[in-house]
Image (cartoon, helix red, strand yellow):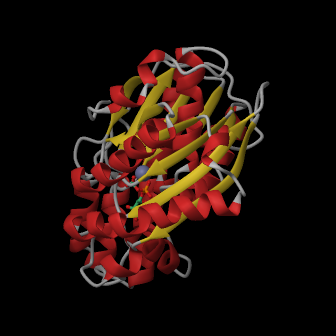
Amino acid sequence: MKILAIESSCDDTAVAIVERRGGKASLRVLVSLVASQEKLHAQFGGVVPEVASRQHLEAIYPLIELALHKTKMTPKRIDAIAVTTNPGLLGSLLVGVNAAKTLGYLWNKPVIPVNHLLGHIYAGWLGDETVVYPLVSLVTSGGHSEIVLTKREGEYKYVGGTRDDAAGEAFDKVARLLGLGYPGGPAVAQRAMTGVAGKVKLPRPMIDEDNFDFSFSGLKTAVTKVRGKKEDIAKEFQTAAVEVLASKLMAAVKKYRAKTMVVGGGVSANRQLRQEIKSRADRLGVKVIIPDIKYCTDNAAMIAAAGHGLWQRAGSGRAAPAKFKWYNANVITD
Ligand code: KG4
Ligand code: ZN
């Protein structure tokens, strides 16, 4: 079973083909392409929605053709198309959704609508690890910082999340405050490498509270009030964000007696966060899956992985479940 997936929710146009061959841990990424718009938006210091959707329009069909070409695949051998339908920038989403529906119609293939955050969680299925339930996931990206509990496959319960800025958004804003450039996450991480944690002091918002919520906006404001070397501020900010994210995740894992945790979203590309979560998970004796860095930031392989999961749950075998007929994908839904 092969799914061609399209992701265009923000500023990356992405296309992937992922195959599933029965059994567990059985997803194989045949191709995963990302056309980044980073340089285009860097001149504005952030994503300009109108520019993003126009760029998606230019990139989407050549990228689909390239994915087919690289895998020597014809549309006949594709079983279904998965596409990100929500959440995201509307103009950007529309480009991907329309491409998916058009191809679904022309090739007579079902279209599977995929929630972007579910995609970030399903990136955990792309490696060799097997997910054992209950599962607690942390999705931490430019737009979201959420903790989700999955007792059984297909059930997703929000147990906590940010009350203001997402973690990635805070990285981006701090990068801007410190004049480190765009995109902010990698820029702060880079500068933090030569910094010393604790040289300046920043708060760990909500870390001791008995819930799984975050608040990053105060942390960002605190950055405007400290004086010190940029690298020390970057390191202390990164350490504060990492400590809060890791301890809330561990608290949720303990409370819900999770057997696996999955961490996804752009901020999980951060090396300090990856190390901190891995070492805390080891101490707890709980399995942790943090995808390859290329599957943490936006990509279409994760959308294909989620598509496979949704397909399996909605039906069985290769026959398209009725709800994925292309004409049913005409609404943007969760
Ligand atoms: O998942 P993603 O690619 O797009 C969204 O769905 O938002 O996440 C992008 C976010 C940005 O805020 C970016 O600054 C952050 O992830 N990010 C990082 C790192 N790489 C990307 N944050 C911290 N450290 C990184 N290495
Ligand atoms: Zn994302």
Vertical placement of residue 74 versus 147, above or below = below
Residue 262 image position (x, y, % from top left): 58, 37
Q: In which quarter of the image is the N terminus?
A: top right
- Of residues 198 and 1, the one nearer the viewer is 1
Kindly tell me whether residue 293 is visible in this rendering.
no
22 versus 81 height, above or below: above
Numbered circles on residues, count: 0
Is residue 241 shown left or right of residue 16?
Answer: left
Question: Between residues 107 and 307, which one lies in front from this camera angle?
Answer: 107
Q: Which residue is drawn at 56% across and 41% down?
A: 304
Figure quadrant of the C terminus: top left
The answer to which quarter of the image holds residue 52 is bottom left
In the image, what residue occupies the spot 44% across and 29% down? 148
Horizontally, residue 212 falls left or right of residue 251, namely left
- Residue 280 location, x and y as percent? 64, 42
Q: For residue 159, what is the image quadrant? A: top left
Indicate the position of residue 249 as horizontal and vertical percent values. 50, 36
Q: Quadrant of ligand 1?
A: bottom left
Q: Where is residue 211 in the image (x, y as percent from the top left)?
A: 35, 28
Q: In this view, does 65 lie to the left or right of 198?
A: right
Determine which quarter of the picture holds residue 50: bottom left
Instruction: Residue 326: tell me if it is visible.
Output: yes
- At 63% from the left and 57% from the top, the residue drawn is 68
Q: Nearer the viewer, residue 99 or 235?
A: 99
Residue beneath the point at 54% across and 21% down: 320
- 134 shown above or below 304: above
